[in-house]
């Protein structure tokens, strides 16, 4: 049964909060600035309102989720810290002597209470509304880019990932008690995930019998992380790693297995819209949606800044129809090229190559200049024919017995003259220099908030991580701007 978030209870010790938590503490500022009651309104249909045992208030559970993201803690370590950290208890609307939840409750909250909810749109909308209310978001320009997040398993199987975490735990134990190695169970000799999990659980039992070890923070944190990894892997529908992660490319020589987050950010460095997808998705197709979402969230959009990925013909037409200035340099392939199967073969601007429907990157390209004034230059892309021969999508794409598989693009020099002229103006060049701001934001997401790697499996888990991360980074930026006023 849904329990409403109670008002802050009275306690003989609540003066400790005023004495020990400074006014410039981030959690204190966020608690006093944000009305989190919207969480209850959004999630109430995932609770029974009049039957069963009282559930922990969804507002408090959501705040636990934010704390996990801010401080990059496992569920168990988060709950342990909430037990003694007064800033955590103040943020959670708990009196100093109040008990905290069991870590399993947070796991269930993520998996059961947040299902079927577009948390990203909800949280970004709330932060943008807050920025507009406090008049710290005034610009009419948004900058677009996509940042990648590698899969939790990062091209490893689930077995290899569990194996990696148990190895880290063993190394930590050896630093304090190397002799314990003699008590450890024998390592599995099979490739079975079930055997690896059985071994890891046996390893945990041995370590946990050594009470002096399990109370050491360096070891306790790793024990909690291993337990969480094993539990998550066992919950997965497939044991093959991350079922929703896909291969994307940052260059012709660098690929990643994971996800993309497509971002729109105001000049004030507040994210106004975001969309999480699997890693192979092309940046080009998300301009329209990011603009529309930003507008829905209350942002006036007069200018869009992006790299060459956003200068497709469709985007040029859309921004012109909407009266939006597009600061995106033309790319001779994706903007001036005439090609067949446009929906199937996507151009990857980072690798400067085309990707086939199966996700394979072209290996080489060749510029073929045709003779005669009426014939245009062609770019021909070559794919690895050995992959084509065994590809599950080869029917209708690869002709049996063919020695090569190519994809050609005809370059048309007479297209997009208006944009070509615009990108040579001083105004275009000046505005294009602002794009560095979103690259700095991507770096902040990854290096300060752990967004370089997914902390769970599947697109749903990635969306929750993205929503919480962007909410936190937006709140930090908004609080900073308000304090500077």
Image: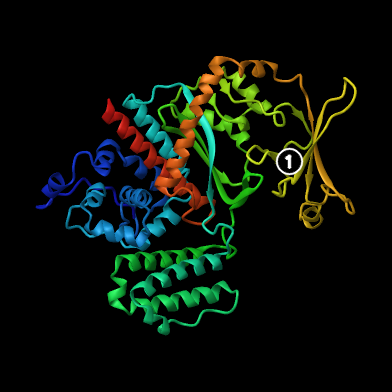
Image point (30%, 65%), residue name:
217
Q: Residue furthest left?
A: 12
Residue for point 54% across, 16% down: 427
Is 234 placed above or below 202 here?
A: above
Q: Taking 409 as reference, is 421 left or right?
A: left
Frontmost residue, 28 versus 296? 28
Please provide percent x and percent y for residue 441. 45, 37
Assess disc 1: are there few (<14), some (14-19) or many (≥20) residues with their C-alpha within 10 Å of its C-alpha: some
Residue 112: x %, y % from top left: 44, 55
Q: Is residue 327 left or right of residue 343?
A: left
In depth, the one of 409 and 180 nearer the eye is: 180
Give the residue displayed 23% in from the left and 52% down from the top.
Answer: 89
Left or right of 57? Residue 166 is right
How far across and how far down the image is residue 465, in percent?
Answer: 45, 49
Secondary element type, mark 1: loop
Q: Total number of numbered labels?
A: 1
- Residue 311 shows in this picture: yes
426 vs 405, left or right, is left
For the N terminus, the image quarter is bottom left
Question: From this viewpoint, is residue 121 visible?
Answer: no
* Whether residue 135 is situated above or below residue 175 in the rendered picture: above
Residue at the spot x=34%, y=31% of the render?
A: 130
Q: Which residue is mark 1?
A: 345
Q: Nearer the viewer, residue 134 or 223?
A: 223
């Amino acid at each position: 049964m849904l329990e409403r978030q109670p008002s802050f209870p009275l306690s003989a010790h609540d003066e400790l909060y005023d004495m020990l938590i400074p006014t410039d503490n981030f959690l204190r500022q966020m608690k006093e600035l944000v009305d989190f009651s919207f969480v209850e309104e959004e999630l109430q249909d995932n609770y029974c309102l009049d039957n069963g045992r009282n559930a922990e208030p969804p507002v408090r559970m959501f705040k636990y989720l934010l704390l996990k993201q801010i401080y990059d803690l496992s569920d168990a370590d988060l709950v342990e810290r909430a037990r003694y950290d007064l800033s955590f208890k103040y943020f959670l609307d708990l009196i100093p002597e109040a008990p905290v939840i069991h870590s399993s409750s947070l796991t269930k909250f993520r998996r059961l209470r947040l299902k079927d909810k577009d948390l990203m749109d909800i949280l970004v909308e709330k932060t943008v509304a807050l920025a507009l209310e406090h008049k710290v978001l005034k610009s009419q320009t948004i900058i677009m880019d996509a940042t990648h997040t590698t899969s939790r398993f990062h091209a490893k199987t689930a077995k290899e990932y569990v194996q990696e975490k148990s190895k880290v735990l063993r190394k930590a134990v050896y630093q304090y008690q190397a002799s314990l190695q003699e008590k450890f169970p024998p390592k599995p000799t099979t490739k079975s995930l079930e055997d690896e999990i059985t071994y890891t659980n046996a390893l945990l039992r041995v370590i946990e019998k050594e009470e002096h070890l399990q109370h050491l923070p360096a070891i306790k944190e790793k024990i909690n992380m291993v337990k969480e990894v094993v539990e998550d892997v066992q919950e997965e529908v497939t044991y093959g790693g991350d079922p929703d992660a896909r291969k994307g490319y940052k260059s012709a020589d660098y690929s990643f297995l994971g996800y993309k987050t497509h971002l729109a950010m105001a000049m004030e460095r507040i994210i106004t819209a975001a969309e999480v997808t699997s890693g192979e998705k092309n940046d080009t197709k998300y301009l329209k949606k990011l603009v529309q979402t930003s507008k829905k969230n209350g942002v006036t959009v007069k200018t869009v800044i992006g790299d060459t990925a956003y200068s497709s013909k469709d985007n040029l037409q859309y921004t012109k129809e909407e009266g939006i200035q597009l600061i995106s340099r033309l790319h001779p392939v994706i903007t001036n090229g005439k090609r067949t199967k446009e929906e199937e073969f996507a151009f990857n601007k980072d690798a400067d190559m085309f990707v086939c429907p199966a996700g394979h990157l072209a290996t080489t390209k060749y510029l073929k200049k045709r003779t005669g004034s009426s014939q245009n230059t062609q770019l021909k892309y070559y794919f690895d024919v050995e992959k084509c021969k065994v590809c599950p999508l080869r029917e209708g794409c690869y002709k049996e017995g063919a020695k090569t598989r190519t994809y050609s693009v005809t370059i048309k020099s007479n297209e997009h003259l208006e944009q070509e002229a615009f990108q040579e103006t001083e105004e275009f060049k000046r505005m294009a220099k602002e794009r560095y701001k979103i690259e700095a934001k991507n770096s902040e997401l990854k290096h300060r908030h752990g967004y370089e790697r997914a902390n769970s499996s599947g697109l749903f888990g990635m969306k929750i991580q993205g929503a919480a991360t962007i909410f936190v980074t937006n709140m930090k930026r908004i609080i900073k701007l308000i304090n500077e006023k």
